[in-house]
Structure formats: C-alpha cells, structure tokens
Image (cartoon, grey):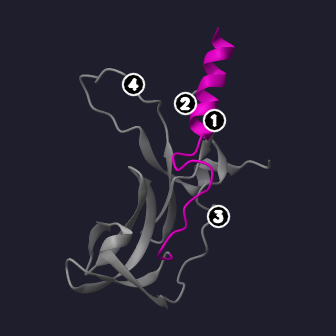
Amino acid sequence: MTEQITDLERCWFLSPPWGQAIPPVEVNVLEKVYIKPNQTFGYCLGVQWYGDCWNYIIEVKNDFIYATKHQIIATGNIQPRTVKKPSFVLGERVLLKIPNHGTKQRLILGIELIEKSWFYLVELALPTFKQPLITTNRFSLVREEDLVRVNV
C-alpha cells in the first residue's frame, strides 16, 4: 500500500499543471516591461505558474507587483546581467535535498530573483480535501542549493 501512495505522490508532483505543452512566457526575466494598470515601467524579476497562467513578478521602485500577460507589455530591453543565469528552467524536473517531503522529485513551477540569488517555486505538499486549522502554502520558493537536476 505504501508503494502505491508513493507512486501516486510521484505522479502528482510530476504532472505539470499546464497540461501537455508548457505555455510560452511573454516576458523574459530581467526584461523591462510597461505595466498598463499603473502606467509605469519596471523589471521582471520572476515568473510563476499560478492558477491557470504565468504570473510575472515586476519590481517597480523597490516594490513588487504581480501581473499577468494582459497587464504588461514587453519592451525587449534586457537589464545587463549582474548575476549568473538560473541553473534550472521552468518545467524542469528536479530532486529536493530537503528531508521529510516524501517523494523528492518535483517540477520547477517558477523562477524568481531575490537579493541577487535565484529561487525556484516547487510544490512541497499534496492538496488536501479538507481545510486544516492552520493554513499552509503547498508551494514554496526553494534555494538553488537545495535542488539537483534529474537526467531523464
């Protein structure tokens, strides 16, 4: 029975929420964008799958705005790189080095630059049918050092 649960967990964590083909991102990380609702410019510091679409994390004057593709316009101007490229890409399969999380394989569901370091959004916990007394987030940003690439 334990093997069946582990197999079910592995299937859940490795099933992409976007279906068969990963949707393209509209904006590159470190690209300057125009934010339509705010009528201002900012830089994209990350992208995460949330709900049923990509959400972009835009830095504007030391504040952060979460926007969908319908709220921003890409400029094509990429900020000069002051940090190394991310080690992992969206949709890539990785292993968690963090203990006590059942099956270790996960998919990269987001990438974000925080204080000159790359963090990756992964799903840490399975969804539950009933709401717990304490609300916990199933998703977490994980440091690059806590992930290992899976060769498939």
Q: Residues within 10 Å of mark 2 (few under 14, many from 20)?
A: few
- Looking at the rendered structure, the kind of residue marked 1 is Lys
Labels 3 and 1: the sequence-earlier one: 3
Which residue, given by chain and number where applicable, does mark 4 sit on? 128
Which residue, given by chain and number where applicable, does mark 3 sit on? 87
Q: Position of residue 42 (x, y in %)?
A: 33, 82
- Note whether 23 is above or below 42 in the view shown: above
Mark 4 vs mark 2: give the one in front: 4
Helix, strand or loop at label 2? It is loop
Residue at x 57%, y 47% (from the top left corner) = 19
- Looking at the rendered structure, the kind of residue marked 4 is Thr
Write the start and end of the magenta stretch as one range: 1-28
Helix, strand or loop at label 1? It is loop
Specify the quadrant of the image occupied by residue 114. bottom left
Labels 4 and 3: the sequence-earlier one: 3
- Label 2–label 3 contact, CB within 8 A: no
- Looking at the rendered structure, the kind of residue marked 3 is Ser
What residue occupies the far left of the structure in this picture?
Answer: 38
How far apart in space, not on screen, are marks 1 and 4 (Cα)? 19 Å
- Looking at the rendered structure, the kind of residue marked 2 is His
Labels 4 and 2: the sequence-earlier one: 2
Labels 2 and 3: the sequence-earlier one: 3
- Would you say 150 lies left or right of 24 here? right
Which residue, given by chain and number where applicable, does mark 2 sit on? 101
Helix, strand or loop at label 3? It is loop
How far apart in space, not on screen, are marks 4 and 2 (Cα)? 15 Å
Which residue, given by chain and number where applicable, does mark 1 sit on? 104
Could one spot residue 27 in this view of the protein? Answer: yes
Q: Residues within 10 Å of mark 1 (few under 14, many from 20)?
A: some
- Would you say 110 lies left or right of 44 here? right
Q: Position of residue 93 (x, y in %)?
A: 67, 48
